[in-house]
Image (cartoon, helix red, strand yellow):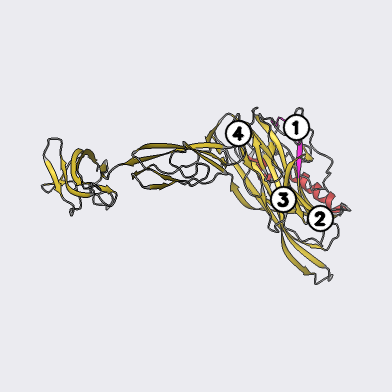
Amino acid sequence: MRSLRHTLVCIFCVLFVTPAIASHIVGGEVTYIYLGDSVSFVSGNLLLKYQVSLSIYEDCLNGQPEAIAQDNPAFLGVFDAFTKATYELDTNVNYAISIAVPDYFSSPCGTIAHTGASCLLKKTFIKTYALPSNPHGYVVAYERCCRNASIANVNNPGNSGATYYCYIPPTTITNNSAVFKNYPPQTICINVPLAYDNSATDADGDSLSYGFCAALNGANDANIKPIPYYPNFGDTVNYLLPYSAVEPFSGTPAIIINPVTGLMTGTPDKIGRYLVTVYCNEWRAGVLINTMKREYQFVVTGTCSYSPYGPYAGADTTVLVGESVPFHAMGGTSYLWTPDTYLSNPNIADPVGSFPIAGVFTYTLHETSDTICNGTATKTVTVLDHTIFLVPTAFTPNGDGKNDLLYPLPLGDTATLISFKVFNRHGNMVYNGGPADPGWDGYYKGVLQDLGVFYWELLYNDNKGIQRKMKGDATLVR
């Protein structure tokens, strides 16, 4: 195997005499899926089949095209997790999927979007392995150089590479690795609260926990894409003070990750590019069986937009005295409606408002989505002491079956229309309808009227039997 490695390295050096430094890679991760087992026809040994996926994140805006081209194929190595012996080396793993990562991300506190030019690709290389039964488990590793030279929290990033790997537990533990749910953010805004969901899902239902950890070195500027070796887990990057593996970039309040939910929170307070590595531990019956990691470069910038979290309190509404209005909010963990006038319970998402008197009542919803994100919204309830008619402020008589007629709509079931009249700007009556008529279609004496403002008046009996008159105007639009 040592001879094979030497031969492969020599071939690689011949092919890439003038390598392009791969500073375009901004992160990576390795995951796997257990596909079942079988028995080898040759040896009779038990074989466990795993589909291993290496994902790398490429800066396709600033990265050198030749360096991006050199990512394909990927070189993967499979090693005994205890003896470190090489089981398999692959130098022809071509990427199977290439996805453009969105230049925005939504969080419980709002949506952050990059306002300048950006391009980020997630390329995934997939290889299926049939691994012999092994009481130690396996490590699958990938190395690539070099990191972006502008990284602010580690020493000499432009001349050092990264190692991405996964651990496959011993044969007695069949397992699928956890998989992070969301793309990493392309940019985050300075002085804007961060709430990034860095959690994962697990097909086996294992308990998951999260934290920050150190990034691993691997490869270098003299050999940017080596045949992988068994990872040196003690060879971590050198973080520059005041940064560290567990405090990768600064914030006020500090940037932290919730060990239970995986939610990254804090408010970044310094512009720059920062190397961040997050681990996800998998626990089964209280025992740690695997750890999956993702390395990524977080870019804190001022060239981004932020749409803060905003709850929805529901549409404004109009009712009659004595009627009730159901309120409805959603998506939060706590609610408060102010003022609490005529509400059944101001501290729930869906109180009921009961209105004994007429008036205009505006309520403010104070909603909390999690422990750090709050927002407000308003809802206005107009309470009338008698029924009225509502008339649209515009209509479009173009024959498309949508909004073709101008007609009054009763608010309440007990309002009775007597007459509805429409006049042009010269005072000429162009329509005179009663309760059985459909409404004005925009025509007068067989001619469709020009666009403009028309005036209406209606006569009706309200819910108390009192005759009332209303006036207003509407615009004819073509």
Give whichever of 303, 144 is nearer the camera.
303
Left or right of residue 8: residue 301:
left
Dot 2 and dot 1 residues touching (CB under 8 Å): no
Q: Which residue is mark 3?
A: 208
Which is in the foreground here, disc 3 or disc 2?
A: 3
Q: CA distance from mark 4 to mark 1?
A: 24 Å
Which is in the foreground here, disc 4 or disc 1?
A: 4
What kind of residue is marked 1?
Answer: Val
**The magenta stretch spans residue 338:** no
4 or 3: tag closer to the N-terminus: 4
- Tell me the SS state at disc 4: loop
In this view, 444 is above or below 426: below
Residue at the spot 62% in from the left edge and 41% down from the top edge: 196
Q: CA distance from mark 4 to mark 3?
A: 25 Å
Dot 4 and dot 3 residues touching (CB under 8 Å): no
Circle 3 crowding by C-alpha within 10 Å: few under 14, some 14–19, many from 20 = many
In this view, 43 is above or below 229: below
In this view, 204 is above or below 336: below
1 or 3: tag closer to the N-terminus: 1
Give whichever of 295, 285 is nearer the camera.
285
3 or 2: tag closer to the N-terminus: 2
- Tell me the SS state at disc 2: strand
Q: Which residue is mark 4?
A: 193
> Whole-percent x and y of residue 219?
78, 41
Instruction: Report the magenta residues as a range.
Output: 150-163
What kind of residue is marked 2?
Answer: Tyr
Q: Which residue is mark 1?
A: 154
- Tell me the SS state at disc 3: strand
Dot 2 and dot 4 residues touching (CB under 8 Å): no
Residue at the spot 35% in from the left edge and 46% down from the top edge: 322
